[in-house]
Amino acid sequence: MKKIAWITDSTCGLSQEYIDKHKIHVLPMIVNINNISYREDIDITKDEVYTLLKKHGEGAKTSQPPYGEFVQLYEELKENYDIGIAIHASSQLTGTYQSSISASEMQGFKVEVIDSKIGSYALGKMIEKGLEMESDGKSFEDIVAKLKQYPDQTEMYLLPQSLEQLKRSGRVSTTQTVFANLLNINLILKFENGKVIVDDKIRSKKKAIRHLFQKIEDAYKNGDLKELGVMHAGALEQAQQWQRDLKELYQNLKIKVEPLVPVAGVHTGYGTMAISWLKE
């Protein structure tokens, strides 16, 4: 068995306890709020990000880890591991995927770098399933082959709180945000092939939530859904209420509540809600 190093970035949404237990190497994304830069999960927790975002949300930004951190990490890993598997946030939204490839090649450390085409809960699930396969004695090649199927089996929907922040971040067009603001419309975003697109435009917040719950019901009925992530940008009470409501509807469904990773929450605003799953 080859000794595998597991690498990702802080968009993975995994708990620090899980990361430490499985010795996952996580490169921190950079969050800039009120003109101060923080390394996610090192200088600042996700909850602290959202506390700051509530006060200083305008103009907040995120960026990928410095390239030198990738190079340094791979230099260290090649001394202790035979090979690596890196799973990163969507290459359409951040340069971590490309930096990871480039740095591993520079250091001469063989790493299979996978574009998750997503982030947050679904990215974390990919890593969890990969580690389960390794624990079961699967070969490196079999693990990688299976992991490469997962990016096309993910779903993630977001209900943004701040259309102004979305417009500033360039994640949706100015025309769409102005139109939505004028008509008091809620945009529902989704990940599609690594990009964030507008999935629907809905008049009221209640109807928007019902729309998301319908997505869950459809996936559950189709047998695609066994575990669900409910994510929030500082709105823990609302996320827990969603969890209770969904548990009443689907007793067998495992529902995990966690903070939305700041690389998404910073662009969609404090109070944003999201749902995600990896199709079974």
Image (cartoon, rainbow, N blue to C red):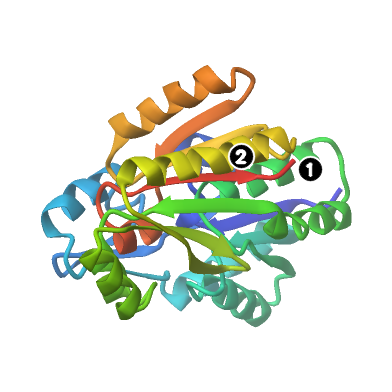
Instruction: Give the CA distance from mark 1 to mark 2.
Output: 11 Å
Identity of the residue drawn at 80% across and 57% down: 144
Identity of the residue drawn at 88% across and 50% down: 139
Residue placed under numbered mark 2 in the picture: 22
Q: Which of 222 and 145 is in front in this view?
A: 222
How packed is label 1: few (under 14 Cα within 10 Å), some, or many (20 or more)? some
> Dot 1: what SS?
helix
Identity of the residue drawn at 48% across and 72% down: 93
Depicted 210 relative to depicted 201: above or below:
above
Q: Nearer the viewer, residue 58 or 210?
A: 210
For the question of whether residue 86 can be seen, the reply is: yes
Q: What residue type is labelled 1?
A: Glu
Pinpoint residue 264: horizontal percent, then vertical percent: 39, 59
Residue placed under numbered mark 1 in the picture: 134
Q: Nearer the viewer, residue 184 or 215?
A: 184
Quadrant in the rendering for residue 39 = bottom left
How packed is label 2: few (under 14 Cα within 10 Å), some, or many (20 or more)? few
Specify the farthest residue to the left.
55
